[in-house]
Image (tube, grey):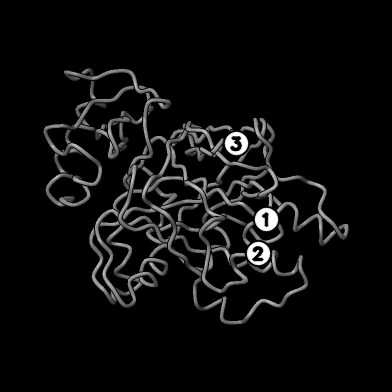
Amino acid sequence: MKLASLKSGRDGRLLVVSRDLTRAVAADDIASTMQEALDNWSQCAPRLTALFEELQAGPVAGEFAFDTAAVAAPLPRSYHWADGSAYVTHVELVRKARGAELPESFWTDPLMYMGASDAFIGAEDDVEVESEDWGIDFEAEVAVFTDDVPAGTSAQAAGDHIVLFALVNDVSLRNLIPGELAKQFGFYQSKPQTSFTPVAVTPDELGEAWDGARLHLPLIARLNDEQIGAPNAGVDMTFDFGQLIAHAAKARGLVAGTVVGSGTVSNQGSQDGSCCLAEVRCLETIADGQPSTPFMSFGDRVEIEMLASDGQSIFGKIDQKVKQYWPPR
């Protein structure tokens, strides 16, 4: 099934959306918000599935046209957002561009940081940044939402706790990152609000593309109508989603509604392009000694999408513009 959150207050109003993303109906009688559904997933999921199947079969009472501009992120705010870096080939490339060796442990021990989850933004909400000098970049990722995950859950068992998938634009301010990492205390200012696709979907909506560990479909990223890349998310994913969840749950349980990101999708050699401008610039640096592609500017438009084998959009499209933010003085 496919679920969304209509913009309403801070936590949205839970919607069930048709597979073709044209129609929706509120799920008020089952759960008022996505978080409520995730908190009670074993009870809510069968009823939400039944409503989804009813919507697929024909008109239902209270249905309306689905408007991607009217929805928030599927989970407008989360108790926990853990973003991994599962594509070690991407990390290796970034380090090669600056002449740094990749520690051997990176191939066996995942990189992960805890991001800001207090206010995720919708697929068509603007990316608001104060200055272009901060190095505005998009990062196209796959993300999963979990139910309650006990501490110490194994990678094999962790996959059973994945209840929903979505796509993410994990915006990075590249020119702020070096100063933050030099403090050896992680990202903060360099990671503004993260945006999500209009809908989140259950694993069965992915068909054979989901093998229980990795999602084997191209992730398409465009900037100003030009395709930057479409690497396959299931290729060169060093750490699968079960491994990422187990890593996050090593010493503590994860609450329902935890969102775990894959990190920037990347394939070795980048033959199908890249899912962020930093990778494009690294390839240019390795080839020419310096990058020629600029980071994003105000007014730029970024689109992120994944298509099923029949060409239909699975999650809807992230389609947003970069806008200058004028802070109060």
| Residue ID at (58%, 32%) | 321
Foreground: disc 3 or disc 2: 2
Query: In terms of image quadrants, where is residue 183?
Result: bottom right
Question: Which mark is on residue 302?
Answer: 3
Q: Is residue 27 left or right of residue 1?
A: left
Mark 3 or mark 1: which comes first in sequence?
Answer: 1
For mark 2, what is the residue? Answer: 178
Q: Is residue 215 left or right of residue 165?
A: right
Q: Amino acid at mark 1?
A: Asn
Secondary structure at numbered mark 2: helix
Label 2: few (<14), some (14–19) or many (≥20) C-alpha neighbours in 10 Å? few
| Residue ID at (74%, 69%) | 96
| Residue ID at (69%, 55%) | 279
Q: Are marks 3 and 1 in contact (CB under 8 Å)?
A: no
Query: Residue 182, relative to residue 49: is it above or below?
Result: below
Q: CA distance from mark 3 to mark 2?
A: 24 Å
Q: CA distance from mark 3 to mark 1?
A: 19 Å
In percent of width and height, residue 75 lies at 33, 44
Mark 3 or mark 2: which comes first in sequence?
Answer: 2
Q: Are marks 2 and 1 in contact (CB under 8 Å)?
A: yes
Q: Amino acid at mark 3?
A: Val
In percent of width and height, residue 179 lies at 64, 65
Question: Which mark is on residue 175?
Answer: 1
Q: CA distance from mark 2 to mark 1?
A: 7 Å
Query: Residue 130, relative to residue 18: is it above or below?
Result: below
Q: Is residue 80 left or right of residue 214?
A: left
| Residue ID at (34%, 42%) | 76
Query: In the image shown, does 130 or 29 lie closer to the viewer?
Result: 130
Q: Amino acid at mark 2?
A: Pro
